[in-house]
Each structure stands twice: as C-alpha cells, then as structure tokens.
Image (cartoon, rainbow, N blue to C red):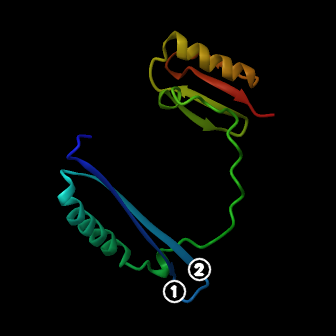
Amino acid sequence: MSEKTAELTVTKGKTVRVGEREEWIRQEYSVKVAVGDLPELEVAKARLEGLIDGWLSITPKPEAAMPYSPQPQAPKPRLELPEELLPLVAVSETDSATIIRPLTYLGSEAFAKLAGLVKAKGGSYVSAGRNSHFQIPKQ
C-alpha cells in the first residue's frame, strides 16, 4: 500500500432471539476495503457502517432458523499438513480412511514431503492413474 492508501475494516454484529423459543442467533458481518487516501477514510467508514446496519436490520424468521441440537465434536484431523501443501490437495474422510487427493501436479519435493507425512501415520500412496491418492487407514 502506498502512503496515500489506507485499509479499513468494519465489523459489526448482533445477537437476536428467534421467535418465541429460547433460541438466539449471532449475526456478524465484516467488510474490508482499501481507501484512496486518508481524507476519504471517514466517508468510507460511515458508508460501510450503513451497509452493515442494513444487513443487520433484517431479522431472521423462526422457520429459517436451524433447530439447535448439540453436535458431537468433529474428530481432530488425522494429518496436520504444512501450509504450502494445503492448496495442492483435497482431504476427505471415509468410514475406513482419510483420503488425500492431489489437486494438481505436486512436483517431486512436495510429493516426497506428503508421502513422508502419510507414511509416518501408517498410510500409503495408491497409484490409480487420475484417481491416485494417499490413504491413511483409521484404526
């Protein structure tokens, strides 16, 4: 960003009761913009606050709300991937295994790194042409 450019983030939220039930929903919106120069900052802030206020003024209808039911906590991921590998793969779970599919050509370095992580967790590479993937069996 140049000296004349400012970045502005406006976040607002509210908690509303849905219908006559003892159910509450948290609504929150955040907008981030780059402002041309500092004198425009106040004008941009006021406009963003007005925009978000408009969004928050819409009260959810009781039938639109999801009924609350406690969800069991999701299991912790079986494989912690380094940041540089995250955009290159898709991770999914089946009843019997964690599947890691490359989304693009990994290259030898990324492939070796991923293969090492999978092998350390007891998994392996499944060579199946376009459907090739890494698989870590669930215990």
Q: Dot 1 surroundings within 10 Å: few (below 14), some, or many (20 or more)?
A: some
Q: Which residue is mark 1?
A: 19
Position in image of residue 138 (x %, y %): 76, 34
Quarter of the figure with residue 111: top right
Residue found 49% across the figure and 17% down from its top: 106
Residue 117 spot, x, y in % from top left: 67, 22
Above or below residue 109? Residue 36 is below
Q: Quadrant of residue 23?
A: bottom right
The residue pinned by badge 2 equals 23
* Label 2 crowd bin: few (<14), some (14–19), many (20+), radius 10 Å: some
In front of the other: 78 or 69: 78
The answer to whether the residues at label 2 and label 1 have Cβ atoms under 8 Å apart is: yes
Furthest residue to the right?
A: 139
For image coordinates 52% across by 31% down, the residue present is 86
Amino acid type, callout 1: Gly
Q: Vertically, is 101 above or below 96?
A: above
Indicate the secondary structure of the residue bearing disc 2.
Answer: loop
Q: Amino acid at mark 2?
A: Glu
Q: Quadrant of the C terminus?
A: top right
Foreground of the two, 65 or 41 = 41
Classify residue 22 as left or right of residue 130: right
Work out which quarter of the rendered image holds the N terminus and state it.
top left
